[in-house]
Image (cartoon, helix red, strand yellow):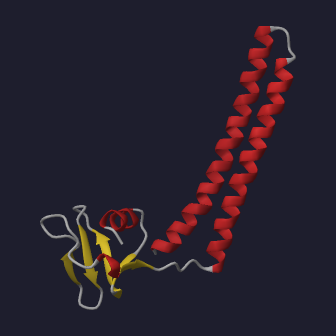
C-alpha cells in the first residue's frame, strides 16, 4: 500500500495494519503517523527522515470487517441516495414543464423559487438521513 493511501485511510478513521493486527498505523495529536505495537505499547515512525516508508509497502493492509448490519445500512444509504436523486430530478423536470407554460414572468419566477426551495429542503433532509447512516457505519468501524 502506498504511503499516500495509508495516510488517507488513517486520517479517515480506517484502521491500517502492518504485518499483523498487532501493528496498527495511527495518527497522533501532533499529526505524526506512527506504527503502534499493541502488545508492548511501542511506537515507531511510519516514515524515515526522507519521508519514505520505514517498512515494505506490500506489508500494509486493512481489514474489511463490515458486519451484516453495517452492509445492510450501507446498501440502504446507497439505495436512498439513488432513489431521492432520481425523485428530485423528476420533480424538478415536472416543475420546469409546468412553469414554462405560465405566461406571466413574475408569477413564473415566484412559483419556481418556491418549488425549488421545497425541493432543496427535501434534498437536504434526505442527504442528512443518508449521512447519519454512513456516520453510524464509520463510528462502528473506528470503535
Q: Quadrant of the N terminus?
A: bottom left
Residue occupying image coordinates x 75% and y 39%: 89
Eyeballing the image, is 5 above or below 38? above
Q: Nearer the viewer, residue 92 or 19?
A: 19
Asked whether, in this view, residue 104 is left or right of residue 16, the answer is: right
Q: Nearer the viewer, residue 9 or 119?
A: 9
Residue occupying image coordinates x 64% and y 56%: 130
Tell me residue 73's x, y (percent). Answer: 66, 68
Residue occupying image coordinates x 24% and y 73%: 34
How many numbered discs sit on the rendered protein?
A: 0
Q: Quadrant of residue 37?
A: bottom left
Tell me residue 55's x, y (percent). Answer: 24, 79
Eyeballing the image, is 77 above or below 72? above
Asked whether, in this view, residue 41 is left or right of residue 95, the answer is: left
Q: Nearer the viewer, residue 18 or 31?
A: 18
Q: Quadrant of residue 25?
A: bottom left
Outermost residue on the left side: it is: 49
Tell me residue 42's x, y (percent). Answer: 20, 84
Eyeballing the image, is 107 above or below 25? above
Residue occupying image coordinates x 72% and y 59%: 79
Tell me residue 13's x, y (percent). Answer: 42, 67
Asked whether, in this view, residue 132 is left or right of residue 22, the answer is: right
Amino acid at each position: 500500500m502506498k504511503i499516500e493511501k495509508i495516510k488517507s485511510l488513517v486520517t479517515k478513521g480506517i484502521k491500517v495494519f502492518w504485518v499483523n493486527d498487532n501493528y496498527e498505523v495511527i495518527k497522533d495529536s501532533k499529526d505524526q503517523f506512527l506504527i503502534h505495537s499493541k502488545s508492548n505499547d511501542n511506537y515507531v515512525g511510519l516514515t524515515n527522515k526522507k519521508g519514505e516508508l520505514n517498512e515494505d509497502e506490500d506489508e500494509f493492509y486493512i481489514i474489511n470487517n463490515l458486519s451484516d448490519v453495517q452492509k445492510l445500512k450501507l446498501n440502504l444509504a446507497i439505495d436512498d441516495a439513488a432513489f431521492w436523486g432520481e425523485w428530485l430530478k423528476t420533480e424538478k423536470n415536472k416543475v420546469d414543464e409546468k412553469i414554462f407554460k405560465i405566461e406571466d414572468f413574475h408569477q413564473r419566477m415566484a412559483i419556481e423559487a418556491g418549488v425549488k426551495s421545497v425541493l432543496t429542503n427535501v434534498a437536504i433532509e434526505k442527504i442528512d438521513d443518508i449521512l447519519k447512516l454512513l456516520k453510524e457505519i464509520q463510528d462502528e468501524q473506528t470503535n
